[in-house]
Amino acid sequence: MHDVIIIGAGPAGLSAALWCDELDLDTLVLEKNEQTGGQLHSIYGPVQNYPGVRASNGREFFEHFSQRLSEADFDLWTNVDIEDVDLKAKRIRLRSGEELQAISIIIATGVRRRQLGIPGEAEFVGHGIIESASRDRQDFAGRDACVIGGGDAAAENALLLADVCPTVTLVHRGKALRARPTFVQQLQSQHCITVFLESVVTRIIGYNEVEAVEILRKDALKPFQMAVQAVVIRIGVEPNTELFRGQLQLDDEGYAVVTNQQETNVANVFAIGDVSNPLAPTISGATGAGATAAKVIASRLGGRK
Ligand SMILES: Cc1cc2nc3c(=O)[nH]c(=O)nc-3n(C[C@H](O)[C@H](O)[C@H](O)COP(=O)(O)OP(=O)(O)OC[C@H]3O[C@@H](n4cnc5c(N)ncnc54)[C@H](O)[C@@H]3O)c2cc1C
């Protein structure tokens, strides 16, 4: 029986684990991937908005976490495949057969990129579909690019590609971009960037590499093809809450609903970080929520320290 089992070892889960250690709670962290750190490994640009730390990318930022983690005393299992969770009973069954039990569970499973679900999307990953313009744009210098999405991430990627690509087409299904005003202004001032609003990409086309996208504009009867060699997809994220469906109260988009103590509708089950924060997902928000959950659990267990 553990005091706490934390599911997910991104910034939220790791912060909660550090606090649980400090508060003398017997803690087990379960991470499905081989490495911990979650989305930090997908940040290729600088991280400069976490107080006290400046890093040229997420991996470097994660090194600061890692230094502190090596001093902490909690159990961490990686490559874990959870088969099912009984939140009320606080029981977790792994596909490997083990059954785990805790007094409290902290859900810190974060979010994943939303997918379009269109032909070509899976086939061309790494063959013209770019993981990140920050990291990969030099490989596409001189090629025409298409960015799909209308938020900050889409705008940022379009602006980065505009430094090296002769044309960048931003395709967004909404009536207006959702990106912050400074990004929108920058997009408008770049002559090589064209924005198609109320439009969707219906297919990514090519042989071995991306050669074109098929775009359907609102009110048009038929889609048209546009030659591009690079595509970035940034249509938002979705929370990793499938495992808890039917037990956890979720909002319309599947995010965990929590109290101001990070507690879910199930007593002694907490949700922290991006999985319960659709409005302002940040590293500082995630680590703060981890601290809150750990402190609430410790106080309920009698404030042992
Ligand atoms: C490109 C990019 C740039 C960003 N830039 C910034 C920035 O400059 N500043 C900032 O503050 N934030 C930034 N963010 C956001 C920040 O990375 C997130 O807010 C933060 O990582 C959220 O932490 P988390 O622990 O809640 O979730 P995540 O980082 O998503 O971690 C969740 C963890 O849970 C694991 N997991 C999921 N499902 C299971 C399961 N079933 N079993 C076990 N483990 C599971 C995942 O593998 C992952 O390790 C950026 C994000 C991206 C993608």
Image (tube, rainbow, N blue to C red):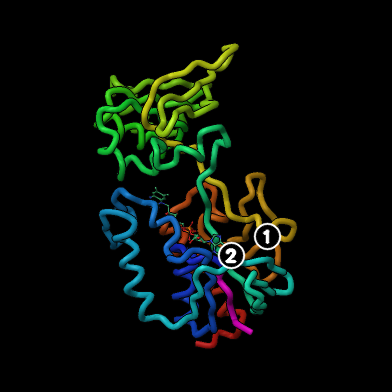
Q: Are marks 2 and 1 in contact (CB under 8 Å)?
A: yes
Q: Label 1 crowding class (10 Å Cα cut-off): few <14, some 14-19, many 20+?
A: some
Q: Residue furthest bottom?
A: 304
Secondary element type, mark 2: strand
Tell me, for residue 115, which label it has, or none.
none
Q: Quadrant of residue 90?
A: bottom right
**Which residue range is magenta in the image?**
1-6
Measure the alpha-carbon separation of dots 2 and 1. 9 Å
**204 left or right of 64 in image:** right
Amino acid type shown at disc 2: Ile
Residue 17: image location, x then y, percent: 48, 74
Spot the residue most to the front: 207
Expressed as whole percent of the image width and height from the top left, the position of residue 305 reads 49, 87
- The amino acid type, in three-letter code, at marker 1 is Phe
Sequence-earlier tag: 2 or 1: 2
Q: Magenta span: helix, strand or loop, mainly?
A: strand
Which residue carries the number 1 mark? 244
- Looking at the image, which residue is at 39% across and 57% down? 40
Rendered residue at 64%/71% (across/down): 94
Q: Is residue 231 above or below residue 167?
A: below
Residue 273 screen position, x and y as percent:
51, 59
Alpha-carbon neighbours of circle 2 within 10 Å: few (<14), some, or many (≥20)?
many
Residue depicted at 50% across the width and 21% down the height: 215
Q: Quadrant of residue 221?
A: top right
The residue indicated by pointer 2 is 107
